[in-house]
Amino acid sequence: MRSLADTVADALGDEVVGESRVSGGDTAAAYRLELASGRRVFAKTHHAPPDGFFTTEAASLAWLASAGAVAVPAVLAVGDGSRREPAHLVLEWIDEGRSVAGTEEDLGRGLARLHRAAPESFGRTDGRTTGSRGLPNASCATWAEFYATQRLEPLARMARSEQALAPTVLDALDRLDADRLVAVGGPMEPPARLHGDLWAGNRLVDRSGGNWLIDPAAHGGHREFDLAMMRLFGGFGAACYSAYDEAWPLAEGWRDRVALHQIAPLVVHAIKFGGGYRTSAAEAITRYA
């Protein structure tokens, strides 16, 4: 099989003259590649990727970029691998910096614009799975149907199979069906264009203080989901949330629903890491079941 460097060189028509390993997620190996032209690019590879691993990410980045709301790196080359070449995703390189005055406000306003760029339905029109657990994204007419059938039900099966949550908690998770979600999920809203995995590590700030989004699990969903994910692990300033609220206020009672939208990522983390995530997931589930 050809090397990543040779694959990238052919795809870009530019010789790779330098290669260094960088952080790039928990499933793929990531590199900074120096090209003969003087350009630098970011490249990821995977020795045994799931079907559609990198082409799904590339499609997700393009889908987010099409909203013209928050910057995402341009996709330069992509392939899911073959006998001849490794799986790869090549993106423009972003020189990281630090926040400046206005960085957080710009992100809040940008996210509101991104969410307003409504997709056709909840889920994905291509039906591709996303995230480290390959969660389904079949198109659904309502958020309650989507969250129940495409997130909570498959996660309950995974958690039960891996004994990640106590039986009583799993029983409570089973009770969070579409009907129950209608009752506790607040006013109905149209689908929003979501990043889908918006923790602080998936937001980059460049040297000018501009915001970039990376590593999406993009889909049509409830806009409160992205914001709840941001609050779960922290790393975003209060000014970001204030700017979002000014641009597009959330529906009344949103604070009471933050933990509802955090159930899915908490169960994922309980499955992957156990520990305190099991307790946090149980608390969130039993609160709404």
Image (spheres, grey):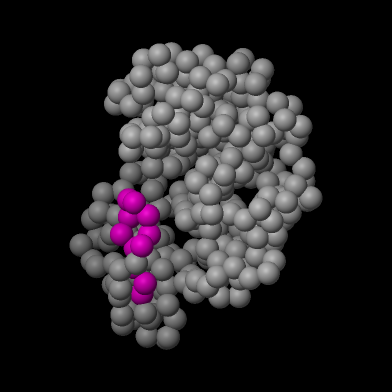
Q: Is residue 27 within the magenta segment?
A: yes
Q: Residue at x 67, y 34 (%)?
A: 255
Q: Residue pushed farthest bottom?
A: 37
Above or below — where is 192 with respect to 179? Answer: below
Q: Residue visible at 40% across and 14% down?
A: 168
Horizontal side, residue 166 vs residue 259: left or right: left
Q: Quadrant of the image for the N terminus? A: bottom left
Q: Percent position (x, y) of residue 286?
A: 51, 19
The residue located at (55%, 21%) in the rendering is 287
Quarter of the image where the C terminus is located = top right
In-front residue for pair 171/84: 171
Give coordinates of residue 87: x percent, y percent.
Answer: 32, 57
Residue 81 appears in the picture as rendered = no
Specify whether 281 is left or right of 184: left
Q: Residue at x 41, y 29 (%)?
A: 279
Residue 227 at x, y = what percent?
61, 43
Query: How many labels, in total?
Result: 0
Q: Is residue 160 visible?
A: yes
Q: Is 83 or 51 nearer to us in this picture?
A: 51
99 and 183: which is toward the camera: 99
Read off the magenta span.
23-33
Placement of 222 over or under 61, stated as above or below: above
Q: Is residue 34 magenta?
A: no
Lateral position of residue 134 relative to residue 216, left or right: left
Instruction: Name the image quarter holding residue 269.
Output: top left
Judging depth in this view, the residue of 222 and 92 nearest the camera is: 222
Q: Is residue 71 above or below residue 245?
A: below
